[in-house]
Amino acid sequence: MTRLGEAGEFGTLARLIRERIEHPGVIVGPGDDAAVLRPSPGTDLVATTDALVEGRHYLPDWITPAELGARLAAANLSDLAAMAAQPRWALLSIAARADHEVESLEALERALERTLADAGAVIVGGNLTATEGPEWLSLTLLGEVARGREWTRHGARPGDLVAVTGSPGRAGAGLMLALRLGARARAEAWRPLMDAWLRPAARVALARTLAVTGAITAAIDLSDGLLGDLGHLCEASGVGAELDAGDPGDSLLERAAAELGVPAFDLWAGPSDDYELLLAVDPAGRAALEAAAAVAGGAVGFVGRFTGTPGLIARVEPGGARRPLDPTGFDHFAGTGGRAAGSGAGGRRAVRRPRAPGRRSGGSGRGRR
């Protein structure tokens, strides 16, 4: 094994980067002072960025370098999925200690490249620097969307349906099991929950298929948990929401709830970085949306409706009573019910609960990287 301190910055970069890239829109790729990119005609540029900090978002004992790279990609890809955008180009920055093994960085970057490539994107630049403290990774992802066709958080209307893809809450359940059970959480019985937490997959292809139906009026990715992200969408759209009563319909989540001694609904709706999508759906387009999801092989469940009472999110009990719910999701700088950063283990938000609601978009050239 070769340490960064032995290989040096430029020796490491020579092993990490691919200077010759054949990819649509890449005029100048890695190896220069900045990348030169050409968006497709008739599209708008969509940009997002996310960072993972050692001990805050992941612990090496719980996640492999390859899983970490793939998870960093998934976190950014999910943001673009929530905008109905096509991922195109990425900028990767790494801060590592001198004793870090170059081979582990190679495994991380190759997995990141594969995950991005599966969604149609490529790394075009970035930066490598040294740190003496916690290591960190940052990815900026750029994508395209047909002009005027992007999804946002702002379009939900009273009467629109609340829909979610996949199985919300599983990532959070995986984290809670790891905290409670330690190594026993690695048992085969819990593998789907651990996969949801450590090895998530973004819904890029499904989002682009659903976008064709025209039924989506607003969207957000589930990275703060269903209630937290529903709260963000409701705030942006100036609406409220009602969630249907009943169990989540996820037997594995219910089994985890029994093991943890918490209600299954709390796992399903609580803080969890699942990278699923929460959608506002025009009722008239429901059938078309369900048909499109079936063709794409993706599950979409309808769990409630939006209301004209801004800021109020409630659960409709079997007898018709409305029980107000707290839509608080994860906040980096606030308490999280005992699941604060550093108390857990794992992937992008492995040790924290999902990220704070604000998103900064931007990037930097990979220049010499």
Image: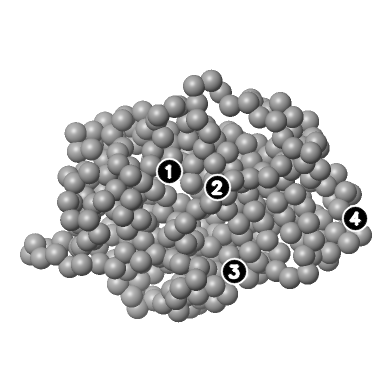
How many angstroms separate mark 4 from mark 2 (CA)? 32 Å
x and y, in percent, of residue 17 in the image = 78, 42
Residue at the spot of label 2: 361
Of circles 1 and 2, which is in front?
2
Of the numbered discs in the image, which one, if any, rests on residue 7?
4
Between disc 3 and disc 1, whose residue precedes?
A: 3
How many angstroms separate mark 2 from mark 3 (CA)? 21 Å
Q: Amino acid at mark 2?
A: Ser
How many angstroms separate mark 1 from mark 2 (CA)? 14 Å
Residue at the spot of label 3: 56
Between disc 1 and disc 4, whose residue precedes?
A: 4
- Left or right for 332, reference 283: right
Which residue is rendered at x = 57% and y = 49% of the image?
49
How many angstroms separate mark 3 from mark 1 (CA)? 25 Å
Q: Amino acid at mark 1?
A: Ala
Between disc 2 and disc 3, whose residue precedes?
A: 3
